[in-house]
Amino acid sequence: MPRRTRLVLPMLAALALTVLSVTISACGYSSDSKDVVEGEVVELGDLKYQVVFSRFLNPNDNEDSAYLVGQSPAKKGSSYFGIFLEVQNKSEENQKLAETFTIADADEQTFDAVPSESLYAFPFGGEVEPQEPIPAPDSTPQQGPIEGSLVLFELPSSASENRPLTLSIDGPEGPAKVTLDL
């Protein structure tokens, strides 16, 4: 084997190992920023919020119809959009959950969450017990396919064209902003 090849191979292996270790160490990364992207954790007071998943919902799909229980059909030119959240109370006291969620598109149009009768619905303004998560263990949303509590929106078709969409979560330290992955 030529001398040059013997030097290049260990250098490439070291470079690959460095890239792999940086990638692995970034998994589960969280910061104190109130501006995050979908999948990252954001802290509001003693609560940690994480958008697990977001997507448009299809009322003709069996799974999605469970998320849309009690909803009238979306207005013409609109669709239902679901954001699935996990929340963790890291304190030793009951904590109040956010009451207000809004989505803003790139044109700064805002859309408020709509009430939901679904078993998967997020408990707006409810309380979470010390060291407990939302959704609660063994609850319908925790056992569901996405394993998150649903915050439901009705968005006009133009919203998906005006990306990015940003979710605002009301909290004691001001709102957190989560850039949604569409």
Image (spheres, rainbow, N blue to C red):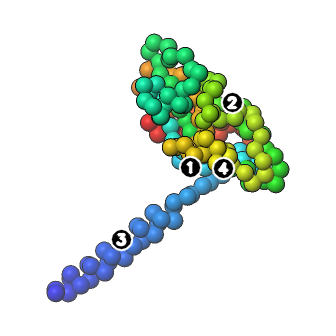
Tell me how far mark 3 sits from mark 1, CA to CA: 26 Å
Indicate left or right for 58 with 33 as reference: left
Query: Which numbered dot is residue 16?
Result: 3
- Mark whose residue sits in front, 3 or 1: 1
Q: Which residue is mark 4?
A: 137
Which badge, 4 or 3, is on the more N-terminal residue?
3
**Secondary structure found at label 4:** loop
Looking at numbered disc 2 in the image, what kind of residue is underneath it? Answer: Thr
Which badge, 1 or 4, is on the more N-terminal residue?
1
Indicate left or right for 55 with 100 as reference: left
Indicate left or right for 165 with 101 as reference: left
Tell me how far mark 2 sits from mark 4, CA to CA: 24 Å
Which badge, 3 or 2, is on the more N-terminal residue?
3
| Residue 104 seen in this snapshot | no
Q: Position of residue 53 (x, y in %)?
A: 51, 41
Q: What residue is rendered at 54% in x and 43% in y? A: 144
Looking at numbered disc 4 in the image, what kind of residue is underneath it? Answer: Pro
Looking at numbered disc 1 in the image, what kind of residue is underneath it? Answer: Glu
Q: Mark 4: few, some, or many residues within 10 Å (few <14, many ≥20)?
A: few
Q: Position of residue 168 (x, y in %)?
A: 62, 34
159, above or below 43, in the image: above
123, above or below 79, in the image: below
Q: Which residue is mark 1?
A: 40
